[in-house]
Image: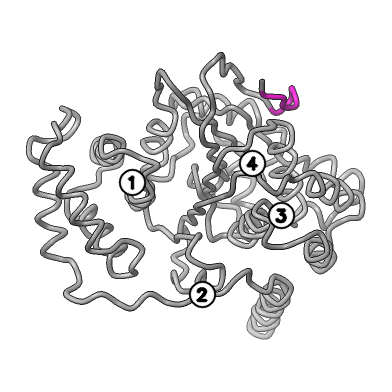
Amino acid sequence: MLKLRVSDVVSQDPGDVPVVRIYRWDLDKTYLKTEFDSIKDLIRTALQKPEDKINVPGAVALLKEVKRPRPESRSMVTFISGSPTQMRSILEKKFELDGIQPDAFILKPTLENILKGRLKAVRGQVGYKLEALLRVRSDAALSVPETLFGDDAEQDAFIYSVYADLVSGNIGLDVLRDVLVEAEVYATTMEKIMRYAAHLQPDDAEVDRIFINLDRRSPPGRFLTFGPRIVPIVNYFQAALVLWADETFTLDNLVHVAGGMLSRDDYGIQELANSFQDLLRRRVLTSAHLDRLEAEVEVYEEPDIIPSGFVKRLMTRVRALAPRSEIKEREWVGPPDYIEILRADRALKAAVTQKSAGLFG
């Protein structure tokens, strides 16, 4: 039985169907196309009606496959967002319009932080998201694999990677404490995080995949320091391809995501083929994956949500675009030096701020 805070729960009706995987999503720039770089952006976002909010292309199609009913098992979906709690009703209505029913939906207590003078917590994400991730994992009391979705606008890759390494035991409480101190997390939040982390079990199922939506078109190489578990993506067809390669998705799941992006998001066969080729070029996928997919397609009966012969035409285009030689896989030794990453990130932000002040200040 799932045990989540009542205020966080949208739906928890697992019945007797076992949960076999948990998908954890960020909201802004991962599920919804949201701008929050200026006060004007924040006000416009706060005043938007549910029907005016725009999804990141492919997000709804992917989530519908994640939540597709199965007789023998199901997946759990949680959203942990930096949006304020005052937006809950609007965002829940948006989920309803999209036909998505999360199992848990956590929003940031921004107003509470302001009233308590915790201004660093208003902008900071490390303490808030780590505490939420560990709390939801602890409350659900499920030892199943996790897949995480975030974006490149803030620190999702860093936070998710720390969380994944904690769960897998690659880093200990001493490293976690150093990270929280370096990130200037408030003492009360730090205490909660340390308490949840101390109860992680060594045999817990791990986070086996992290997707980062490149909303700001960050170069994928920026995320190499976090290792191959993190895959930067330019759209959710790429995420579906990797989930299929990981054997988390079936070919039918993959085709339905493609079909959803064709019908709902105006994607075409060329965009999907280019997305596939990009993963081959970056060696996220290999020619062996391409061979396996072609073998599955030969015995696959296409659903009527896509044009007849679409999958075989897509494969032909991918073959034509595929790299002639494969780049040698890059060696990686982890976990990363999280303290050094935080310091480098802070130095970069300071340099950008100083440069801006010099030009316009």
Q: Nearer the viewer, residue 276 or 209?
A: 209
Which amino acid does the dot numbered 3 rest on? Gln
Q: Nearer the viewer, residue 235 or 174?
A: 174
Q: CA distance from mark 3 to mark 2?
A: 27 Å
Identify the residue at horizontal 48%, vertical 47% (top origin): 33
Tag 3 near tag 2, CB within 8 Å? no
- Which residue position holds label 2? 332
- Which residue position holds label 1? 244
Which amino acid does the dot numbered 1 rest on? Trp
Q: Is residue 4 above or below residue 24?
A: above
Q: Secondary structure at mark 2?
A: loop
Is residue 310 in view from this perspective?
yes
Q: Nearer the viewer, residue 3 or 71?
A: 71
Q: Residue 137 at what x, y percent from top left?
A: 69, 38
Q: Earlier in the sequence, mark 2 or mark 1?
A: 1
Which amino acid does the dot numbered 2 rest on? Trp
Q: Is residue 92 above or below residue 33?
A: above
Identify the residue at horizontal 69%, vertical 44% (top origin): 133
Q: Which residues are magenta?
A: 2-8
* Nearer the camera: disc 4 or disc 2: 2
Identify the residue at horizontal 51%, vertical 50% (top origin): 29
Tag shown at residue 80: 4
Q: Relative to residue 236, is residue 311 drawn left or right?
A: left
